[in-house]
Amino acid sequence: MTEHQHINRRAMSALVFEGFLTRFGSGIAAFALPLYAYSLDMSLAAIGLLMSLNIGVAAVTKPVFAGFVDRIGYRRSAVIATSLRVVILALLLVSATPLALYAVQVLRGLAKSFRDPALQVLVASHGGKKTLASAFAWYGTAKSVAVSLGKSVAGVMLGYWAGLYSLPFALALIPTAVPVFLLLFMVNEIELVAPAKIQKPRPKRSQTMDIVKDLWPVMGFGFMVSATGRMLRGLLPILAVEYAGLNEAVAGSLYLVGAVITLISAPVFGWVSDNMSRRFVLAVRGFANATSSLLYAFMPGLTGFYVAKAVDSVGAAAFKPAWGVLMAEAALPRVAHKGRVMGVLGASRDAGTLVGPVIGGTLWTLFGPVPMLLTRAVLALGTEVYAHFFLHRMIASSDLEKPKDTCSLVKCSIGYRDTAQADTGQTSVRQQS
């Protein structure tokens, strides 16, 4: 992967603004879409399927489409995917049937398959080798805060103009279209490397299967963290109203608390990951999930839920920059397939995001909210046990605790020797800074 020793501030500023504006538009649409679907007399089960369909499509197609991203270029892929999101929002304005909404969500999933790996490679390439976690922290913070703001704006709009769903969809078009120009004029394309020129002859085998074989510990960690973290996705408002006895307005304010906490803590954890201990930052998410679950279960009420949401948000803010760096380092040995590596690892998180709410909803239905929350706490701690035996030992053995060490997780810890040498065209496995 083409990396810069120092951050490319022009490109990173454009990428952060791109993430903010795109997610702001997505937040507006995401709030209005289920309400619009409900107005079309869709059942709650059908709406739940609708809202998760794009994630399911992305989880399946991302490893495949990420290969095309490697071939056609990362900035170009990001521009194509962002432009497609504009088209998708325009289609929402004319979608008047459940079938049309399902088709739009499928297109959203396909756009996500192109967009995520392309932008992750761009952030990894322009973020600077010594400040990579901080770059991912700011990028992730911009997206998280923008989603919360977008949902708040959509809620206010629909509060004043109830039933006029075309208004938020039309408004979402504006911030979603601007990033196309940011990517075109402020972000440089990353030099592509032709696989045929750098690979030695070797048995014909699927690149995706090679990546899965080498990176399964990282994929498992990403899946488990996302599954436990997302068990309350879509259930938190119901938990706040039905279990804690809060009203809908207070339940909505929980997301603003999360946005503020993310804005404050994510850059701090990015700096800690870059300069102190990435292992500590990766571990915060699991312990935060467990702690917040206990708070939700045993401190139902305004104070308990605010504190629990704050703890949850701290965990999410800590995980994103460290995970971004982990993906970037995993992609280092495969110069010509870094987008595919990002796609495979991203798909593991998408799968966790898809499965988590199903597990949470099923446990709640069968046993009630408290057993569901206790199970979430146990699974979160189990994720840390998994990380200790399969992930943190790899990080320790590859000296990744030293922030300035450029040895990649894959090269040093998963026996990635011959392939790394072939993919980089180097005679040495270890890449020098």
Image (cartoon, rainbow, N blue to C red):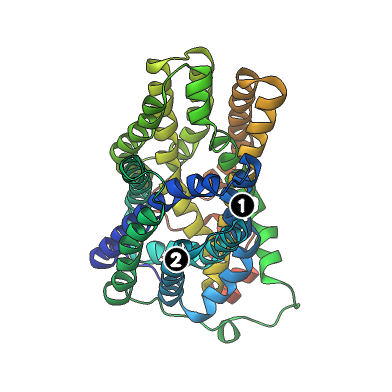
Amino acid identity at mark 1: Ser
Q: Splitting the image into 4 quarters, where does residue 262 fall?
A: top left
Q: Is residue 317 above or below residue 103?
A: above
Q: CA distance from mark 1 to mark 2?
A: 23 Å
- Can you identify the residue that label 2 sits on? 85
261 up-or-down from 213: above or below: above
Closest to the observer: 192 or 69?
Answer: 69
On the image, the x and y values in percent for residue 5 come to 31, 64
Q: Nearer the viewer, residue 368 or 328?
A: 368
Label 2: element kind: helix
Dividing the image into 4 quarters, which one contains the C terminus?
bottom left
Residue at mark 1: 348
Residue 333 shows in the view: no
State left or right for residue 135 relative to residue 113.
left
User: Which residue is at the far top?
Assistant: 298
* Mark 1 secondary-structure assignment: helix
